[in-house]
Amino acid sequence: MIPSAVRRLLVHLYGKVLMKTSGCPFCKIIAHEMPATLAYQDDRCIVIEDIHPQAPIHLLVIPRRHLATLAEAAEEDEGLMGHLLIVAARVAQERGSHSYRAVINTNAEAGQTIYHLHVHVLAGRVLRWPPG
Ligand code: ZN
């Protein structure tokens, strides 16, 4: 049996290899090569509905520029990262939510499955703390 830490590392590396060999699904959505339900867009990001919603409102704020994880964000990305959070707040409020959660899962153990940084916006139900 493979120790869990090694298994997680393999899943993480496989995910990254998969993105490089088969193409990033979010980049494909941004390039109009893959369908998605668009909720908002501007010159720096798009917002789509999550295809596996975990709450009545579950949106993904995705930068147009491919950045694999938050861990790879650099000082030059400060403006972009701030923009993503401002957009997250705006789209949640536009859906009538004044209580919402903005989450960035970083790497496999934290639940990141698509290696193109994105902000989950969850609302429309009571969100427990700590998350699972
Ligand atoms: Zn991408």
Image: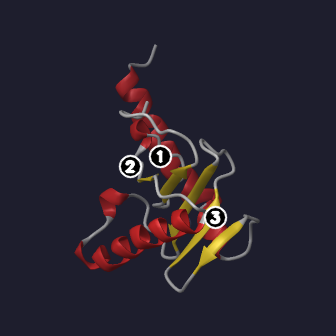
The answer to which quarter of the image holds residue 37 is: bottom right
Report the mark closest to the observer, 1 or 3: 3
Rendering coords of residue 52 (x, y %) = 66, 45
- Residue lying at the far left in this picture: please name it: 75
Q: Is residue 66 visible?
A: yes
Mark seen at residue 112: 1
Say what amino acid the circle numbered 2 marks. Thr
Disc 2 to disc 1, C-alpha distance: 6 Å
Numbered disc 2: secondary structure: loop
Rendering coords of residue 54 (x, y %) = 60, 41
The residue at the point 74 percent across, 66 percent down is 34
Say what amino acid the circle numbered 3 marks. Ile
Mark seen at residue 106: 2
State the residue in front, 121 or 31: 121
Say what amino acid the circle numbered 1 marks. Gln
Q: Are marks 2 and 1 in contact (CB under 8 Å)?
A: yes
Numbered disc 3: secondary structure: strand
* Within-10-Å neighbours for mark 3: few <14, some 14–19, many 20+: some
In which quadrant is the C terminus drawn? Answer: top left
State the residue in front, 123 or 21: 123
Rendering coords of residue 91 (x, y %) = 55, 68
Mark seen at residue 48: 3
Q: Earlier in the sequence, mark 1 or mark 3?
A: 3
State the residue in front, 66 or 102: 102
Rendering coords of residue 131 (x, y %) = 41, 34
- Whether residue 94 is situated above or below residue 119 in the rendered picture: below
Numbered disc 1: secondary structure: loop
The answer to which quarter of the image holds residue 125 is: top right
